[in-house]
Amino acid sequence: MNKKKTFRWIKIIVLLYCSIGIALYYLQEKFLFHPVTLAADYTFDFKTPFEEVAIPLNSDETINMVKFFSTDTITNGVVLYYHGNKQNINRYAKFVNAFTKNGYEVWMPDYQGFGKSTGLRTEKKLNELALQVYKMANAKFKNDNIIIYGKSLGTGIAAYAASVTNNKRLILETPYYSIPSLFSCYAPIYPTTKMSTYKIPVNEYLGEVKYPITIFHGTDDGVIPYRNASKLRNVLKPIDEFITIENGTHHNLAEFDLYKKKLDSLLKLR
């Protein structure tokens, strides 16, 4: 009788394990991306001077990007800002003042399916988007006037763009080691490397970046655990920086004096 009960419990556990694993596999796109679409005729309303640009990638895909202009009298360069996984540009526009006040334009694209951007989203297409934005920026600005910035999910896209281009600096806010390693923080009993359709190996990309990297991460980050991001220290160069924000969460690093002062100092570097 005990053997039958044991066998029954084993079957239940295996069934639960498989069911949860299947759900995780097929729902991972929904876990990773939380876009809010906007109508094509939607009108943005930002305090910072801006220009909206449509970038046609092919007949079926158009990337919508907003260029925020410098509020300083001199334009020192451009920040290519790859945002997080929620909503659209409207959510992240509040962060551009930190750059525009220091004489930088900020170019912020929405990913496929976010805001007014159209088309199917894949890891390859996200990388292609990043390179297309970079090529446009490089036609106007010299390499040493281009800063690539990534926030949360966008750190992987920014890291990829930085790994295949030569610029002034790469800045990452709340990055992850890779998508499979991040998933393993939430589902450690599953083979996340095989299950993840998105890989985005930030660790590998950073190893290819030849110019300075600065990373900001908070110790109380409940979305991308500090321990996951901290593993990126192993691939940083001696000139790179990993800046720990004590008590910082995933959403509030911009409120800390350490972040503000360090970012200002980076943007003032010539």
Image: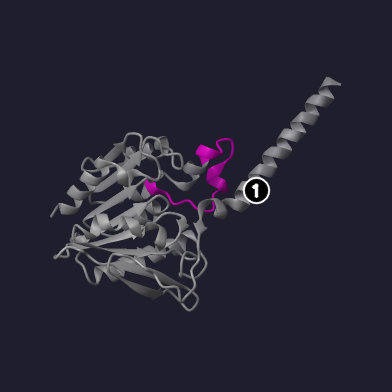
In the rendered image, which quarter contains the N terminus? top right
Residue farthest along the bottom direction in this orientation = 59
Residue at image location 61% in from the left, 49% down from the top: 25
The quarter holding residue 249 reads top left
Q: Position of residue 210 (x, y in %)?
A: 25, 51
The quarter holding residue 255 reads top left
Determine crowd level at label 1: few under 14, some 14-19, many 20+ residues with C-alpha closer than 10 A. Answer: few
Where 173 falls versus 186 (above or below)? below
Q: Number of marks in the image? A: 1
User: In the figure, is residue 165 to the left or right of 194?
Assistant: left
Q: Position of residue 170 (x, y in %)?
A: 27, 52
Q: Where is residue 90 in the image (x, y as percent from the top left)?
A: 40, 62
Residue at image location 28% in from the left, 40% down from the top: 242
Q: Nearer the viewer, residue 211 or 97?
A: 97
Residue farthest along the right direction in this orientation = 1
User: In the figure, is residue 257 to the left or right of 108?
Assistant: left
Residue at image location 37% in from the left, 63% down from the top: 130
Under mark 1, the amino acid is Ala
Residue at image location 35% in from the left, 56% down from the top: 158
User: In the figure, is residue 178 to the left or right of 100?
Assistant: right
For the record, the magenta segment spans 184-203
Q: Which of 38 and 150 is in front in this view?
A: 38
Q: Mark 1 points at which residue?
A: 23
Q: Is mark 1 on a helix, strand or loop?
A: helix
